[in-house]
Image (spheres, rainbow, N blue to C red):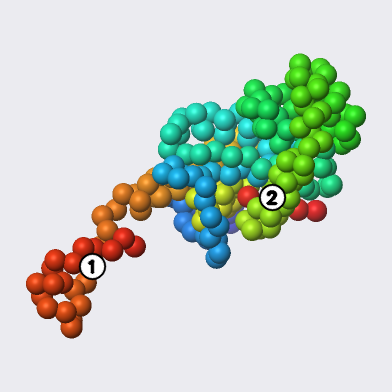
Amino acid sequence: MSLLNRIFRCVLLLASMSLMATAGASPTMPQAGVEYQVLKRPQPADGGKKIEVIEFFGYFCPHCNALEPLIAEWVKKQGDNIVFKRVHVNFHGLVPQQKLYFTMEAMGKADEYHMKAFNAFHIDRNRLQSDAEVMEFVNKSGLDKQKFSDIYNSFSIQSKLNRAAQLSDAYQVDGVPFIAVDGRFTTSPVMSVTTIARVTEEEQNRSVLQVLDFLITKIQKERNAPAAPAAASSTAPASAAAAAPAKAPVKKK
């Protein structure tokens, strides 16, 4: 066999192995420590019977901007399975952007104006870096200016800023977008394709939604699993043991 043929066969083999490795990796069957992480210190989840999902994001972030339409669609699909929350992080000292989101949220206008704020930054080039630039957005968007100003400068918004900082630290958020599920699991678009090479940003974003689907299903199965029967005490009479009721058991720069 000629040297050229050997080289050609080696190239084909390597290409085949690469395709096989990529095909074998799938975010539909993610693994802890790979496509998602398990928090060493679980956080209190405020979802009740539903599953709490928190997206840490920033209006300054182009990747958050790209993810937003897809994750908004995913949230609608999940419906009553989840309680979805957003936390605007304080990277780069962009407190006005944080205050903008939390004020819209307090007004009950976040869902309606959230994408408009992204567009203001990434399309209209309003960097939302100052109170004046935020108010420019408010004027153009049609939000109630007086009501917005009153809430924007209120103590309640400062409390939300403090809470956002606490959550970011608790969930060890070092980059956005970053998603926490049920106070126990965290993932991101980049993390979701850890084992897959050469993917587009849209593929990353769709992959993280698959990881989220997996985690939601995993948690639902855990919650619906029948409780293990209580073991009878070796010192108690058998009849008494049988009669005893079972006891119930968010990259930082």
Mark toward the start of the polypeptide (2 vs 1)? 2
CB of mark 2 within 8 Å of CB of mark 1? no
Tell me which residue sits at (77%, 26%) in the image: 148
**Residue at disc 1, secondary structure:** loop
Q: Secondary structure at mark 2?
A: helix
208 left or right, relative to 219: right
Residue 76 locus on image (x, y percent): 50, 29
Q: Which residue is mark 2?
A: 163
Q: Pointer 1: what residue?
A: 230
- Can residue 60 be seen? no
Q: Residue at x 78, y 37 (%)?
A: 154
In the depicted structure, whether residue 127 falls above or below residue 141? below
Of residue 52 and residue 48, the one placed in the foreground of this image is 48
Residue 54's place in the image compared with 100, above or below, is: below
Residue nearest the observer in this picture, 15 or 190: 190
Observer able to see residue 41: yes
Please tell me whether residue 15 is drawn above or below residue 249 in the rendered image.
above
- Using residue 160 as the reference point, say whether residue 253 is left or right of it: right
Q: Relative to 232, say whether 142 is above or below.
A: above
Q: Give the image location of residue 111, x and y in percent.
A: 62, 27
- Mark 2 is surrounded, within 10 Å at the Cα level, by few (under 14), some (14 to 19) or many (20 or more) other residues, namely few
Amino acid found under the numbered disc labelled 1: Ala
Please name the amino acid that badge 2 sits on. Arg
